[in-house]
Amino acid sequence: MDPSMSVLVIVHTESDGALATPALEAVNAARALAQQLATPFHVGLVGAVVEPAAAALGTCGAASFRAVAGDAFAQARYATDVAAAAGIATAVGADLVIVPGTSRALRTAGGLAQRLGGVADTHVVGVAASAGVVSITRWFYRQRIEGTMSRTARPWVIALETGTTPAWAGAPGAGGVEAVAVSVETRSAVTGVRAPSTGEQTVRPDADLLLVAGAGWTKKQADGQVHAEAAQSAILGFLRASKASLGGSKSLVDQSGEGQAVLPFMTHLNQVGQTGSSPRHRKGLATCCHGEEPHVIGWRFVTERRAVNLNANCGWAQGKADVVYVADAFAVMKKVNELLGA
């Protein structure tokens, strides 16, 4: 082991100065890696306000807290974010730099490595050290093959995929912050933020439950009619009551993209599967899906999987789900919504 090797984790604070779950996961991963290397680790904070984040991490065991703070660093912007990260990494003299796999951090990971004269790897799902050798784990070939690799080049910037490691949950403490001076010139200005209201939001990465809707919701039912409005009411009603995240099979989102007014709230952002996202929710419930291989690949990291389908021989029943309910999804979700509203 090499005690001289330094580990740094760089995270961005939220508007209130707190840290989101991906940031806490990155801190915990850096802490564990430093323990395996028997070397200290440092925390870098970037944002408008950083004191609440430093206090929340006060007992994490970091050797130091370095920060670049101010209004210029409140919003995600490449010029300011990469300059702040490079300034902190240079001040620490970091050999290993861990960042969360958020869109903000991923945008600057490559530029940060270039400024430091190092290398970068993204979408990493695990980082560990053995006998002083640091290795990372990630998926290849549409997440069908898991591989482990190591690098000798330093500094090494590692972007950790969210949901792959437990988040730091220690007690708060007094974390003294050392400011790092960074000079930046910006040619853009953030004039405001537009976001959907809570009731309209269907993609919730931090939700415990993922509800996936399949094309069966838009097919003719037992009475020979299509009940798109009833499907919309059942799905949105469940999402609002449970605060679950919504996923969709490729066949369903393609129908929406072709202009068919089936489920107007469903877009390709909801697609789960080989050509969509691979969520990491604790539980997943597939409704009116057949459990085809491309769709199931997107469920690789869902811990508990259940499905509702009228076909007892569907793909979910072939060892791809923990529990399969052979029932009408319309009737099941109607009853569930009644129970949630009780």
Image: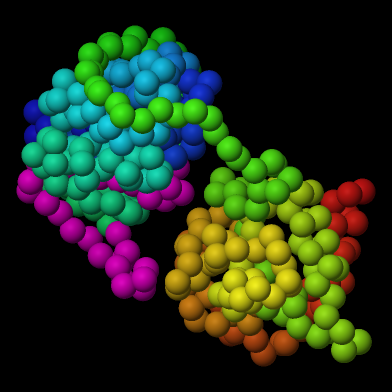
Task: Kindly identify the residue that appears in the image at 23 percent across and 28 percent down.
Answer: 83
Q: Is residue 23 visible?
A: yes
For residue 82, side relative to residue 269 (left or right): left
- Picture quarter containing residue 139? bottom left
Q: Is residue 168 visible?
A: no
Task: Kindly identify the residue that appears in the image at 69 percent across and 60 percent down.
Answer: 265
For residue 328, side relative to residue 146 (left or right): right
Visual colour scheme: rainbow
Task: Kindly identify the residue that appears in the image at 64 percent across and 59 percent down.
Answer: 246
For residue 172, side relative to residue 122 (left or right): right
Q: Is residue 181 above or below residue 104?
A: above
Magenta range = 138-166
Q: Is residue 232 above or below residue 101?
A: below
- Picture quarter containing residue 275? bottom left
Query: Does the stretch in magenta take in 209?
Result: no
Image location of residue 117, percent across then percent down: 8, 39
Task: Kindly identify the residue that appears in the image at 55 percent across and 33 percent down.
Answer: 193
Tell which residue pokes out farthest to the front in this image: 187
Image location of residue 8, percent across then percent down: 24, 30
Q: Is residue 213 above or below residue 99?
A: below
Q: 233 or 306: which is nearer to us?
A: 233
Q: Is residue 101 above or below residue 263?
A: above
User: How many numbered circles does the render carry?
Assistant: 0
For residue 75, side relative to residue 320 (left or right): left
Image location of residue 181, percent across then percent down: 23, 14
- Picture quarter containing residue 149? bottom left
Which part of the image, by quadrant, shows the N terminus?
top left
